[in-house]
Every structure is written in C-alpha cells, then in structure tokens.
Amino acid sequence: GGRWWMFATHTAVRGHGASTVLLVVDALTGPWRPHPAGTVSTDVRGARGAGAVLEVGGRLLRPSQDCARHYGHALVLNEILALDERDYAERPLRRFEHEWPGRCD
C-alpha cells in the first residue's frame, strides 16, 4: 500500500515481559509514527520478535518467541490477518518446540 511497516520489540523494565509495537511511515526516511492499532502483543508467549516478517504461500507470517518457560523456548509463526493504515490483526498459526538440554537464559 505504498507504506513501510516496522515491528519493534522492547522491554521497558528489566524482568518484565517484552511488548511488540507496530510503526508505519509513508517514506523510509520517516518520520515513523505509531500504528493506530497500537501494541501488537504483550503476551510473553509471542511478543518477543524472532526475525523478519515472511511471505509464505501468499500469507504474511510474523515469527515470535515463546518465552513463557524460558527465553526462546519455542518459535511461533503468527499469521497476519489484517495490515493496513487502520487495522492490524494476527493469529498464531504454527508452533515449533524443542526440549533443549539446558536453559538459554
């Protein structure tokens, strides 16, 4: 739609969960502004980003980490259902888990 979109994940206070926000801009040089939909996720099971948005089979997928058990416990692919100048919606599509021999954090 002639716009640039950026998902940004941050932890405001050490020890608290991450949150992912969506930013939008008409020209890559800015200024970036918050998307009207606001925060994409504050859920520890999917807020922390895990790479760039992917297009697979005509679907847009936002990878995220499930950090509920520990940092990076699982990878979740969230299907982006709506992304335009007013709306954003996603749903978890696929989850990948692995029992690591030790903790990552």
Image (tube, rainbow, N blue to C red):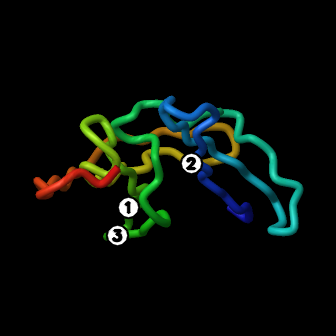
From this view, report whether residue 27 is shown above or below residue 48: below
45 sits to left or right of 35: left
Which amino acid, by three-letter code, is at mark 1? Arg
The vertical placement of 63 against 48, above or below, is below
Q: CA distance from mark 1 to mark 2?
A: 12 Å
Q: Which labelled disc corresponds to residue 83?
A: 2
Quarter of the image with the N terminus in it: bottom right
Closest to the observer, 95 or 2:
95
Question: Which residue is tagged 1?
Answer: 59
Q: In the picture shown, does residue 52 fall above or below 32?
A: below
Give the secondary structure at mark 3.
strand
Asked if labels 1 and 3 touch by Cβ distance under 8 angstroms, the answer is: yes
Going by the numbered disc 2, the residue's amino acid type is: Leu
Q: Position of residue 6 (x, y in %)?
A: 65, 56
- The Cα–Cα distance between marks 3 and 1, rounded to whole angstroms, is 5 Å
Quadrant in the picture for residue 70: top left
Mark 3 = which residue? 56
CA gap, disc 2 to disc 3? Answer: 16 Å
Could you say whether the residue bearing mark 2 is in a helix, strand or loop?
strand
First in sequence, mark 1 or 2: give its number.
1
Question: Which amino acid lies under the numbered mark 3 shown in the image of this protein?
Answer: Val
Mark 2 and mark 3 in contact? Answer it, CB < 8 Å: no
Q: Secondary structure at mark 1?
A: strand
Q: Position of residue 55 (x, y in %)?
A: 42, 69
Q: Where's residue 10, x and y in %?
A: 60, 44
Mark 1 is surrounded, within 10 Å at the Cα level, by few (under 14), some (14 to 19) or many (20 or more) other residues, namely: few
At x 49%, y 31%, the residue is 15
